[in-house]
Image (cartoon, helix red, strand yellow):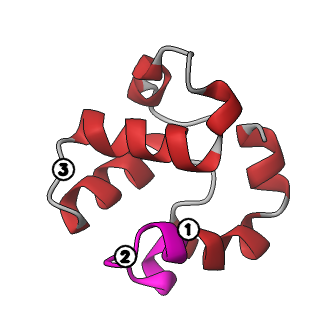
Amino acid sequence: MTWSDILQDWHGQLERLHDLFPHADPVALARFRGNRRLLAEYIADTHDLTEAEGAEAIELRLMPGAATRDVSVFACAAE
């Protein structure tokens, strides 16, 4: 699954995001549509991770086929 696939079904992915990151507020997750950096920051804050670890967790859990990619893509402001 790619980030584009996730964005196309963002509303449908919210339950999955909450299942993967149980400390995250589902309402808050809905606000981060399209902004990987802010999503990574939020996941990091709510799960006691660094921002880089939050970004990596998103990459590994939502896009497992992309696990070999460089997660520095999350440093971008937004897609």
* Element carrying mark 1: helix
Q: Is residue 47 above or below residue 52?
A: below
Judging by the rendered image, the residue that carries numbered circle 1 is 17
Judging by the rendered image, the residue that carries numbered circle 3 is 49
Tell me, yes or no, whether the two marked residues, 3 and 2, touch with CB atoms within 8 Å: no
Question: Could you tell me how far apart the alpha carbons at marks 1 and 3 are, in whole angstroms?
Answer: 16 Å
- Quadrant occupied by the N terminus: top right
- Quadrant occupied by the C terminus: top right
What mark, if any, has residue 54 been given in the picture? none
Range covered by the magenta-colored residues: 17-29
What mark, if any, has residue 24 been given in the picture? 2
- Residue 35 position within the rendered picture, expressed as x and y whole percent measured from the top left: 53, 47
Mark 1 surroundings within 10 Å by alpha-carbon count, few (fewer than 14), some (14 through 19), many (20 or more): many
**Three-letter amino acid code of the residue under disc 1:** Leu
Say whether residue 64 is magenta: no
Location of residue 11 (image quadrant): bottom right
**Three-letter amino acid code of the residue under disc 2:** Ala
Mark 1 or mark 3: which comes first in sequence?
1
